[in-house]
Amino acid sequence: MKCAEALAAFLASGNSAGWRELPVFAADGAAARACAAVDAERAAGHVVAPVPERVFAALALTPLDAVRAVILGQDPYPTPGHANGLAFSYVGPAPLPRSLVNIYKERAEDLGEPTPADGDLTRWAKQGVLLLNTALTVREGASKAGSHLSLGWGAVTDAVIATVSRERAHVVFLLWGNPAQTKRPLIDESRHLVIASAHPSPLSARRGFFGSKPFSRANAWLDEQGEKPIAW
């Protein structure tokens, strides 16, 4: 399957409700152009993650009218076999990706709860946590992080973030890392909570991610707004 075919399948499914009305998903919109660039990458011999069927997984699992929180990362894991379309999520054998290990460390310290047995964050997505990367694809391989940030995904994810800000109420935006924080102007902070910190990567986690308590802060704010906390 090509990315263009995956996009068509996503837009034809009920899972795209709320998202398909965005202009970026029109027939000649930004999503189609980004997918065309991804398909050109594959045609040139590059291995791209995630597989096409999972490129729009975050949007499919968390419809617009269900969004209560957004975790914004940079791009999918470039390590072969790690990316599954949900930011920071991992389905596979041990060891877990190091960023996810650090997320779980902060979760344990913040909430005083044991570390989950696996890296699949689908349970978060199904509670309304949009696990979005600023780019939805990446070349697989060492030193390939950020390789698709210029393929046009930014227009798509910008539109998603701005739409959530405009259409939803009382959403927590967790912006992890500098690329995620560049999206802050898209968010109406008079209506939503922004929790910004360093990226959970081993290169930066000790520069402000550890100790940021994003999970308890998010739930405390949701509770203040009369919203149901998230079972992190």
Image (spheres, rainbow, N blue to C red):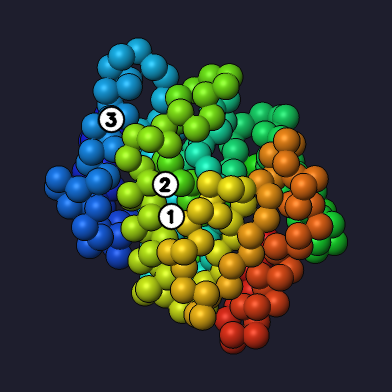
**Residue 23 image offset from top left, x and y in percent:** 21, 57
Q: Can residue 202 be seen in this view?
A: yes
Mark 2 near mark 1, Cβ–Cβ under 8 Å?
yes
Instruction: Name the quadrant containing residue 47.
Output: top left
In which quadrant is the C terminus drawn? bottom right
Task: Indicate which disc, 1 or 3, sits on the residue closer to the N terminus.
Answer: 3
For the point 24% across and 32% down, the residue is 36
Q: How far apart are marks 2 and 3 (CA)?
A: 19 Å
- Kindly state the secondary structure of the residue where label 2 is placed: helix
Side of 184 where 162 appears, left or right: left
The amino acid type of the residue labelled 1 equals: Leu
Instruction: Name the quadrant containing residue 120.
Output: top right
For the point 61% across and 48% down, the residue is 177
For the point 32% across and 29% down, the residue is 38
**Residue 179 image offset from top left, x and y in percent:** 53, 46
**Residue 77 image offset from top left, x and y in percent:** 55, 33
Instruction: Name the quadrant containing residue 93.
Output: top right
In which quadrant is the N terminus drawn? top left
Of 128 and 71, nearer the camera is 71
Side of 169 where 208 appears, left or right: right
- Kindly state the secondary structure of the residue where label 1 is placed: helix
The amino acid type of the residue labelled 3 equals: Ala
The amino acid type of the residue labelled 2 equals: Ala
The residue where tag 2 is placed is: 57
Task: Indicate which disc, 2 or 3, sits on the residue closer to the N terminus.
Answer: 3
**Residue 14 image offset from top left, x and y in percent:** 28, 58
- Kindly state the secondary structure of the residue where label 3 is placed: helix
The residue where tag 1 is placed is: 61
Of 115 and 203, nearer the camera is 203
For the point 80% across and 61% down, the residue is 110
The residue where tag 3 is placed is: 37
Q: Distance between the residues labelled 2 and 1?
A: 6 Å
